């Protein structure tokens, strides 16, 4: 057998399909707060003005039907407000994980269920860490914590989407 050297570049692709959501109809899960007081705990903002501004901003977004473009905007607002940390923000900006061959996000306008997506990604990551306990490093556990925070934030936003009132009704007392 002969080895033939070549100078051709090896084609490597960073393309990934969108994450396949197993339960696309899921609108409630363990991260959906049972009442308004829990929503207020998750959406921890400082002043009444900040809470009111956040409410106004969020009323146009439905976490059960949202695009990566929209999720990035929501994530940025939550991050800037101090509701989520940088790892959780990473979940928001990654969206449905669809990328082209150069690793750039694709189909960022396509709507999907972020409630189900975030919950299923966390479960998959938990299973990965169970199967690979040596990879439960400080950085990976920080990423998992970010996934938890992202799930809690999306759960709080889902609570608003499923509430019967036209406006958000969390306690705005600081």
Image (cartoon, grey):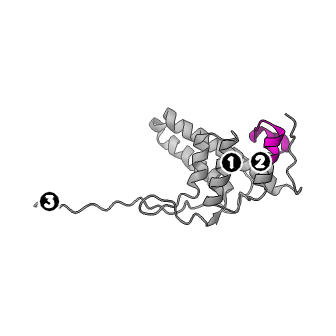
Residue range highlighted in magenta: 35-53
Disc nearer the start of the sequence (2/3) = 3
Q: What x and y, as percent, mark residue 96?
A: 57, 58
Does 130 sit left or right of 12 as displayed? right
Report if residue 56 lies within the magenta region: no
Assign a secondary structure to mark 3: loop
Does 124 sit left or right of 163 as displayed? left
Q: Which residue is mark 1?
A: 77
Q: CA distance from mark 1 to mark 3?
A: 52 Å
Disc nearer the start of the sequence (1/3) = 3
Pointer 1 with pointer 2, Cβ within 8 A:
yes
- Which label is found at residue 5? 3
Q: Which residue is mark 2?
A: 54
Q: Nearer the viewer, mark 2 or mark 3?
A: 2
| Front position in the image: 11 or 129 | 11
Q: Is residue 39 visible?
A: no
């Amino acid at each position: 057998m002969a080895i033939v050297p070549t100078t051709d570049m090896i084609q490597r692709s960073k393309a990934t399909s969108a994450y396949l959501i197993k339960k696309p109809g899921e609108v409630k899960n363990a991260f959906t707060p049972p009442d308004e007081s829990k929503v207020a705990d998750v959406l921890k903002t400082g002043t009444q003005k900040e809470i009111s501004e956040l409410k106004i901003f969020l009323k146009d977004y439905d976490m059960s039907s949202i695009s990566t473009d929209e999720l990035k905007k929501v994530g940025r607002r939550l991050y800037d407000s101090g509701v989520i940390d940088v790892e959780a923000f990473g979940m928001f900006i990654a969206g449905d994980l669809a990328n082209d061959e150069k690793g750039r996000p694709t189909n960022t306008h396509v709507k999907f269920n972020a409630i189900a997506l975030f919950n299923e990604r966390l479960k998959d990551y938990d299973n990965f860490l169970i199967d690979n306990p040596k990879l439960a490093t400080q950085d990976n556990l920080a990423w998992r914590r970010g996934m938890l925070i992202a799930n809690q934030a999306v759960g709080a936003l889902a609570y608003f989407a499923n509430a019967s009132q036209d406006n958000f009704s969390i306690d705005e007392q600081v």
